Amino acid sequence: MLSYQHAYHAGNLADLHKHALLATALDYLTRKDKPLSYLETHAGRGLYRLDGAEATKTGEARAGIQRAEAEGWLPPGHPLLDAWAQIRRSHGPQAYPGSPLIAAHFLRRGDSAHLAELHPAEHEALMHVAGFATLHRQDGFQMAQAVCPPTPRRGLILIDPSYEVKADYAAIPRQIGLIARKWNVGVIALWYPILTDARHVPMLTALMTSYPDALRSEVSFPPARAGHSMVGSGLWVLNPPFGLDEEAARIEDIFRRNA
């Protein structure tokens, strides 16, 4: 359960899908002059290097955000491009922000953030870049159950597990149900991989049965390398902010035309 390290996959096409929608959601939520809470259950280290040994070993960033930027997949002024630019100004041109630092770009004075990361090395690295947040070295779902409903009550939680164990898929609908009952006004966003064996389907069926009005966005792309089983990315959002469905449709069309 503690073996996954996102540095090998940071900046891949799944990150592009997930982070484009996350940035859009946070951009909308922070336009209103009301404080909010941002929670993340599996935060990772927060900041990655595209020229690091891990990223260059897999080549996923090269086939992901580096290709997307070179080919102009996202329009000028997109919230994710603004976040990337700010991170690079602060940390150099090869820096890539994970979702905690993308969130930090949008959060304002008076907003609150709680980030959970159980992996000891990832948590230690997160401590160096996430001074804006309360950090929790514990299971992310335990953190969510303890913190929800957060203060302020308005806000968003990103659930982004590694899915190293197949049992995660069966457990997530119940975990989301518990969070939703405690925090019925919260935006609950779940990222999931689309694998060749389609193991996500029962989980999504359960979630859509319980929450038929939730947003479900999925994109497809070729495997990053021979034998790699991930062929797509999904984001499921309960209580999606206004306009996120339109942005999801735009991102899905970009992937259909380019991936």
Image (tube, grey):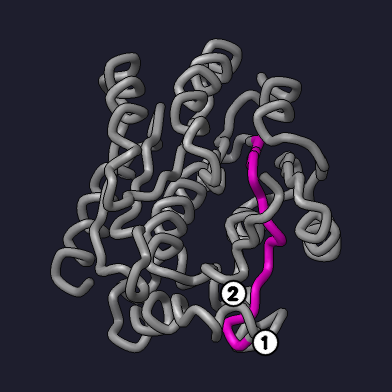
Amino acid type at mark 1: Gly
Q: Residue at x 67, y 87 (%)?
A: 92
Q: Amino acid under label 2?
A: Tyr
Say the numbered circle drawn on residue 96: 2
Find out whether residue 134 is within the magenta segment: no
Number of labelled discs?
2
As displayed, is residue 204 above or below residue 192?
Answer: above
**In the image: residue 167, left or right of residue 200:** right
Disc 2: CA contacts within 10 A as few (<14), some (14-19) or many (>=20): many
The residue carrying pointer 1 sits among few (fewer than 14), some (14 to 19) or many (20 or more) residues within 10 Å by Cα, namely few
Residue at the disc numbered 1: 92
Label 1 element class: loop
User: In the displayed structure, would residue 52 be above or below residue 241?
Assistant: below
> Height in image: 209 above or below 17?
above
Occupied quadrant, residue 83 = bottom right
- Which residue sits at x=25%, y=69%? 222
Magenta span? 37-51
Q: Is residue 20 visible?
A: yes
- Taking depth in this image into account, of 198 and 140 the one nearest to the observer is 198
Please say whether residue 38 is one of the residues in the magenta stretch: yes
